[in-house]
Image (cartoon, helix red, strand yellow):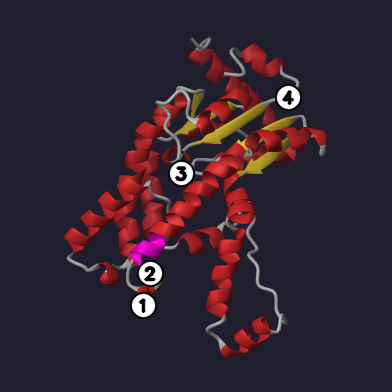
Amino acid sequence: MIYQTAADYLNAPRKKLALFGMSGLGKTRISTLLRDQGNWFHYSVDYRIGTRYMGEFIADNFKREAMKVPLLRELLMTDSVYIASNITFDNLAPLSTYLGKPGDPAKGGLAFTEYQRRQAEHAGAEVAAMLDTTRFSERAAAIYGYPHFICDTSGSICEVVEANDPSDPVLREMADNLLLVWIKGSDAHRDALCARFDRAPKPMYYRPQFLMQVWAEYLTQSGCLETQADPDAFLRFGYARLLDSRQPRYEAMARWGVSITAEEVSAVQTAQDFDHLISRALDRRGPAA
């Protein structure tokens, strides 16, 4: 770890961290708080994915839909309109919409092979965005003068790394340049996230083998063909299973850094509170072997 003790962290002229864990536990809230209060550069992996690495895919998908409308088709063919994604740190809907969900096209579903293709695009984009972190931490200081750097990772980071491999290229790059911080949720948090997801399911990334397993289970239990599957029903079916499958992967990643709880994160109101929380986490862990 780049900080071995609380003193190392508190005395560092440049603090550099990456937050990871389930979506909905406070990564973006804390990153925004630090950006607003403490001279921290906020690097959002999801934003980087949706702009740099998948922005063209997203815009092309909008254009394909627009070409189905005669008026818009004519305007597009004459370069009379401009169609682009308006993705922001707080609104990642264009990325989610492109990732999509498999099933009945009449209900907004994608053919499963197309869904797999978009999942693979997302995996490649996520790895690339993570590997950009070091360069962005350097740019943040050199160009903008930010002394500190916070990486707000995607909830699916655990799906594209192998934490038990000490030479994993993404984790090796991250750990060599930032302190990895796991925001750990409780069973109550898991249940609350599942309830929220049930009300408004959204597209998710699944590692390929797990996706095939869950998709097969859903089709068997529902008795549907691929083209008949209810896309939102599949998302609801898979979400809790996905969270449960990610937990041990997050735990393995935590060995590369420190852990804090979602309850501790919810109590953070200032940049100073956050520094104290990270200090306590380093003290709890003790010097890395």
Residue closer to the observer: 196 or 61: 61
| Residue 163 counted in the magenta span | no
Q: Quadrant of residue 59?
A: bottom right
Mark 2: secondary structure:
loop
| Label 3 Cα neighbours within 10 Å, binned few <14 / some 14-19 / many ≥20 | many
Q: Quadrant of the N terminus?
A: top right
Tag 4: amino acid: Arg
Q: Which residues are magenta?
A: 110-115
Q: Quadrant of residue 34?
A: top right
Name the residue carrying label 1: 106
Mark 4: secondary structure:
loop
Name the residue carrying label 3: 156
**Mark 1 → mark 3, Cα distance in angstroms:** 28 Å
**Mark 4 → mark 2, Cα distance in angstroms:** 46 Å
Q: Is residue 114 above or below residue 21?
A: below
Mark 3: secondary structure:
loop
